[in-house]
Amino acid sequence: MDKKSFLQAGHTPTLLAAFLYFDLAFMVWVLLGPLAVGIAADLGLSHAQKGLMVATPVLAGALLRLVMGVLVDRLSPKKAAIIGQIIVIAALAYAWVAGVHSFSEVLVLGLFLGVAGASFAAALPLASRWYPPEHQGTAMGIAGAGNSGTAFAALFAPGLAMAFGWSNVFGLALIPLVIVFIAFCFMAKDAPDAPPPKTFGEYLKVLKDKDAWWFMFFYAVTFGGFVGLASSLVIYFNTQYGLDPKMAGFFTAGCVFAGSLVRPIGGNVADRVGGVKSLTLMYIFAAFFLAIVSFGLPEAWMALVVFVCAMLALGMGNGAVFQLVPQRFRKEIGVMTGLVGMAGGVGGFYLASSLGYSKQLTGSYQAGFLIFAALALTALIGLTAVKTRWRTTWGAPHLTSAKI
């Protein structure tokens, strides 16, 4: 790819703004995960309750992504993003000032943090609409690298909680959030060729297309695996290996950085070799490494290495899925980003909550990991079943300049 042509093709300030907004939103979306050890100790939570606590923002974010997708197409990506950021900032400010004193209150906070998870449905269309088909994988990968915000939460939140108390972390998180909010308002610009708003009935028509359901399932595995692990690994390393919250956060951050930073690479590789081929390999690797870690490796560093490998596969898979989605649903990219993102969040909720329930019911995390590995293999089978049709219909060489 000609780097200069990519820089000239779109709007770089908007791409950067989308990344920063996405990054900080994802940081607070999974904030309860890195703080879970301290919160659980103070509130006396069980393994299952800890799993549900970290999974609640993921599920809320999943459902709200559909709402955000509608707002993107009805208003604009920038306006939708601004509305979401204001809600999240207000919720964190309230939690910081009033405090969180019970399991039910932390679940309510998790619902509001879910709005941050919905940022996905605004950030990606904001960037995508500026770029032509041959640069979609790279543009979406760069914007989507905001996934790295989950790593910043794991890296800093446990240490800050040990120093200042976990409730004060909510207030500290407001500092970068407000700074990025102001920068976003000035830097971001909606693309001039945005598709006209559609009726709600037209949104429902997308769900009648079986390809929409395939993309939702594929992303439920790649992104679901990524965010489910990002939300759960601090608890896992603390419970399984006895690491203190700060060290568990460092281990988790290493895993999440791996999955986040390769997302643009995944998009770029998909641009070069085709999203289907790239995604096929990623499902194989993800299933393999998740199966290995399910057996409870004897040392924490061994688990770290395997989780990093799994996250690399899942992160590149995320980039590959969103190289394909704009090719198939370019005019409906707002609502499709919401739908596919929603499915990804549902996958993350399932993994995070199932790990907690697996530990609660069996005394081991093995069942949770093995079932998700099986889902990755199921996605591989599904991708194999549809690839020929995709490459001979909407992905045919005479219809698109992108590789499918």
Image (tube, grey):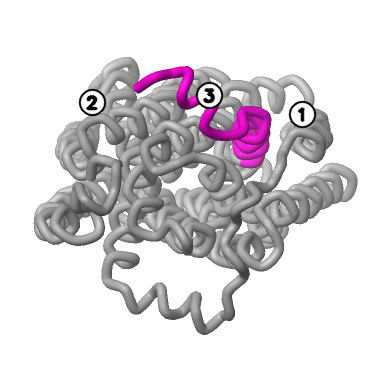
Residue 7 - label: 3
Q: 244 or 303, which lies in front?
A: 303
Dividing the picture into quadrants, the one containing residue 266 is top left
Task: Measuring from the top left, give residue 347's x and y in whole percent.
Answer: 38, 55
Q: What's the magenta bit mostly, secondary-structure-wise?
A: helix
Question: Pointer 2: residues within 10 angstroms few (<14), some, or many (20+)?
Answer: some
Residue of label 1: 176
**Distance Cα–Cα, label 3 vs label 2:** 45 Å
Question: With 144 as the anchor, is 396 left or right in this view?
Answer: left
Q: Disc 3 vs disc 1: which is toward the camera?
A: 3
Q: Secondary structure at mark 2?
A: loop
Q: Disc 3 vs disc 2: which is toward the camera?
A: 3
Task: Measuring from the top left, give residue 191's x and y in whole percent.
Answer: 63, 47
Total labels: the figure holds 3
Dividing the picture into quadrants, the one containing residue 23 is top right
Is 27 drawn above or below residue 85 in the view shown?
A: above
The answer to whether the residues at label 3 and label 1 have Cβ atoms under 8 Å apart is: no
Residue of label 2: 297
Residue 150 - label: none
Magenta-colored span: 1-25
Q: Quadrant of the N terminus?
A: top left
Q: Residue at x 74, y 20 (%)?
A: 163
Is there any visible trace of residue 356 in the rendered image?
Answer: no
Is 231 drawn above or below residue 209 in the view shown?
A: above
Q: Amino acid at mark 1?
A: Pro
Question: With 53 as the anchor, is 354 left or right in this view?
Answer: left
Q: Mark 1 or 2 closer to N-term?
A: 1
User: Is 349 colored magenta in this rendering?
Assistant: no
Q: Amino acid at mark 3?
A: Leu
Dividing the picture into quadrants, the one containing residue 242 is top left
